[in-house]
Image (tube, helix red, strand yellow):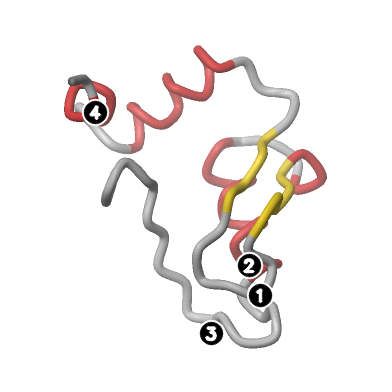
């Protein structure tokens, strides 16, 4: 977590969208959803992206993230 964002480091460079597909596949696998449910909303040609994940309830999403990153939401509380 960095500046209230989830930072992911991939081996593909953020050049000509080369990192987009690996990013989507990684997040889908990490969250246990189909890659078709993960969509890059903004940042297709940037290293900074806003990503939408469909078909997963927010509470389940939070549970999956906190299982992967202990104390995640405790750290983000004001």
Q: Mark 2 or mark 1: name the one nearer the start of the chain.
A: 2
Q: Nearer the viewer, mark 2 or mark 4?
A: 4
Q: Mark 2 or mark 3: name the one nearer the start of the chain.
A: 3
Q: Quadrant of the C terminus?
A: top left
Residue at x 33% of width, y 27% of height: 66
Residue 17 versus residue 29: which sits nearer the camera?
17
Q: CA distance from mark 4 to mark 3?
A: 29 Å
Residue 57 against residue 31 in the figure, above or below: above
Q: Nearer the viewer, mark 4 or mark 3?
A: 4
Residue at x 47% of width, y 72% of height: 10
Q: CA distance from mark 1 to mark 4?
A: 28 Å
Please tell me in which quadrant of the rendered image residue 67 appears.
top left
Residue 76 has which mark? 4
Residue 45 has which mark? 1
Q: Nearer the viewer, mark 1 or mark 3?
A: 1
Q: Give the residue number, with chain letter if any, for mark 3.
A: 13
Q: Mark 1 or mark 3: name the one nearer the start of the chain.
A: 3
Q: Give the residue number, with chain letter if any, for mark 2.
A: 22
Residue contact at pointers 2 and 1, CB within 8 angstroms: no
Disc 2 is placed on an element classified as helix
Q: CA distance from mark 2 to mark 3?
A: 10 Å
Residue 13 vs residue 36: left or right?
left
């Amino acid at each position: 977590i960095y500046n209230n964002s989830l930072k992911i480091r991939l081996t593909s460079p953020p050049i000509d969208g080369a990192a987009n597909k690996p990013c989507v596949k990684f997040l889908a696998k990490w969250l246990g959803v189909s890659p078709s449910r993960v969509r890059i909303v903004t940042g297709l040609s940037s290293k900074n992206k806003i990503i939408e994940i469909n078909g997963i309830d927010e509470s389940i999403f939070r549970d999956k993230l906190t299982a992967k990153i202990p104390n995640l939401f405790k750290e983000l509380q004001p």
